[in-house]
Every structure is written in C-alpha cells, then in structure tokens.
Image (cartoon, rainbow, N blue to C red):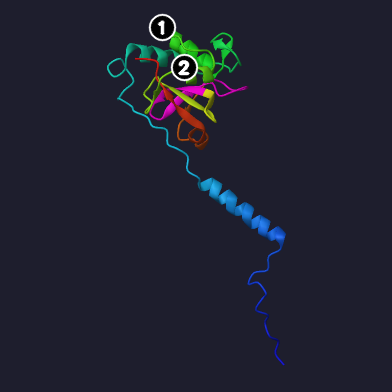
Amino acid sequence: MGRSRSSSSPLIPCSPRHTLVWVIMLLALLAGCSSSQRIATQDPGPIDAENLSMERVLILASAKQALGTPYQWGGNSLESGVDCSGLVQMSYAAAGIQVPRTSNQQYQALDHRDRARPGDLLFFGAGGRATHVGIYLGDRRMIHAPGSGREVTVSSLDIRYWRQHYLGAAGPAP
C-alpha cells in the first residue's frame, strides 16, 4: 500500500525560528536597498576668483589651511583644534562673516539653498536637528572636522552615511 500525502503539510517546513530568520534577512535586504537622497550641488567651474565671490574664495582657503588639524570638541582655532562648527566659524570669520557657534544654531539661523555651491555649508543630522556641518568644496566633496580622534579632512558626499543624514545646505556668503 502506498502512503498518501497529507494536503495540509507545508511545502517547506518552517519553524517559528526559521520564519524569524527569513523576516530579518528580508528586512536587512530592504534596508540596504532603501534610497537616500542625493545631495544637490552646483559647481560653477574652477574654484577661483573668476567663478566665486571673494568671500567664498577666502572661506575655502581658510578651511583648506585647517586640513590635518586635530578635532577638539568646542575648539575653533588651528592652535587648539576645531570641531565641525568651529571650523565653519573660523573659516567664515576669515571672510568677515559671523555665523552662530553650533551646527544646529547655524542650521536654524541661515538661509537654506536648494543646491550647494562651493563655500556653502552642508548640514547633517536627524529629525530636523543638525549635529554635524561641513563646507562644500566643489566636485561633490566637503571639508569637515569628523570627530574625536580624527583630523580635519575632505570627504565625498557620495558616501551613504552623508546621503542618509543630509538635512540641507545654507549659504551665508554672497
């Protein structure tokens, strides 16, 4: 006699543990595929006085002088170190422009732009609160003070972390 197959048996045996594993894998796959916004930029050409205002040229020159400066929370000078908003404050002061001290104060106080131009500020954070700021250099790169134990550096805006945490751009310089 042959055995009859029960029509109620599943095609693939799955325990609750296996189901949980499949759900977690599916969520991880979907999270990895989630889109993050592209940071809109506008590069007018070579970064020089012909294409940018003198203020923007001074801001970028000051920020570039800080490359390699150690991160120092609350710092705003090359001698003592800088944090992200201190780098911005120091660079803008070189062009005669005053900006608030913290990244969130800067984000709240400044006029926002649809597209970042060299010398504009790029803000990052969550929930409408800026926790990090960098200066747009052009060519989809920013200069910033990334955090404790690191130095002022240049980073690509195409890194997923920056795209996922991007809040917007502001341009206090003419």
Look at the image and say whether residue 144 sits in the magenta stretch. yes
Question: Which residues fall within the magenta stretch?
Answer: 133-152
Q: Is residue 53 above or below residue 41?
A: above
Q: Nearer the viewer, mark 1 or mark 2?
A: 2
Q: Is residue 105 above or below residue 160?
A: above
Q: Is residue 157 above or below residue 1?
A: above
The C terminus - image quarter:
top left
Residue at numbered disc 1:
96
Residue at numbered disc 2:
109
Which of the pair 66/55 is nearer the observer? 55
Which of the pair 85/6 is nearer the observer? 6
Q: In the image, which disc is placed on residue 142?
A: none
- Residue 83 shows up from this direction: yes
The image shows residue 121 at horizontal and vertical percentages of 44, 21
Query: Which residue is drawn at the image coordinates 68% and 60% (left, top)?
Result: 18
Q: Earlier in the sequence, mark 1 or mark 2?
A: 1
- Mark 1: few/some/many CA within 10 Å (<14, 14-19, 20+): few
Q: Secondary structure at mark 2?
A: helix
Contact? badges 1 and 2 (CB < 8 Å): no
Q: Amino acid at mark 2?
A: Ala
Q: Secondary structure at mark 1?
A: loop
Query: Which residue is drawn at the image coordinates 56% and 20% (left, top)?
Result: 151
Query: Which residue is drawn at the image coordinates 59% and 13% (left, top)?
Result: 74
